[in-house]
Amino acid sequence: SDAQIIDEHFLVHLNDYLSSGEIFGLFTDDEVEEILNQLRSEAKSQGYNETKESIWKYFIDKVRRNLKIVMCFSPAGNTLR
């Protein structure tokens, strides 16, 4: 039911991901830098350039290939109708 949705902003994030494949503003600048640093050599070995944009694209492509979302809700309540 709609009581299961603690924060309706969560649905905005889910909609963003479903429509564009990316949730903008999900990570802080420091988190983005850490992700880029951790994936730099992996992205390069997969043929991506060493630019921040290219490594970020590699990360997003990897997330799109591997992330699976399963949600189950009862349609009772006004929020989910």
Image: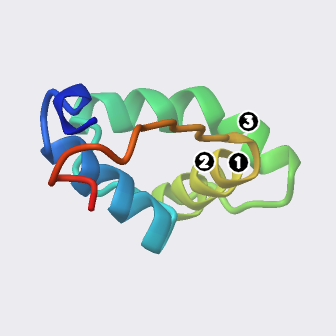
Mark 2 to mark 3 CA distance (whole Å):
12 Å
68 vs 75, nearest the viewer? 75
Q: For the residue labelled by badge 2, is the local secondary structure a helix, a strand or a loop? A: helix
Going from N to C along the chain, the mark reached first, 2 or 3, is 3
Q: Which amino acid does label 3 sit on?
A: Ser
> Element under label 1?
helix
Name the image quarter holding residue 28: top left
Q: Residue 42 vs residue 71: left or right? A: right
Residue shown at the point (67%, 41%) measured from the top left: 68
Q: Which amino acid does label 2 sit on?
A: Phe
> How far apart are the alpha carbons under marks 1 and 2?
5 Å
* Closer to the eye: label 2 or 3: 2
Identify residue type, mark 1. Lys
Residue drawn at point x = 23 percent, y = 56 percent: 12
Q: Residue 62 carries which label?
A: 1
Tell me the quarter of the picture where residue 30 sits.
top left
Q: Mark 2 points at which residue?
A: 59
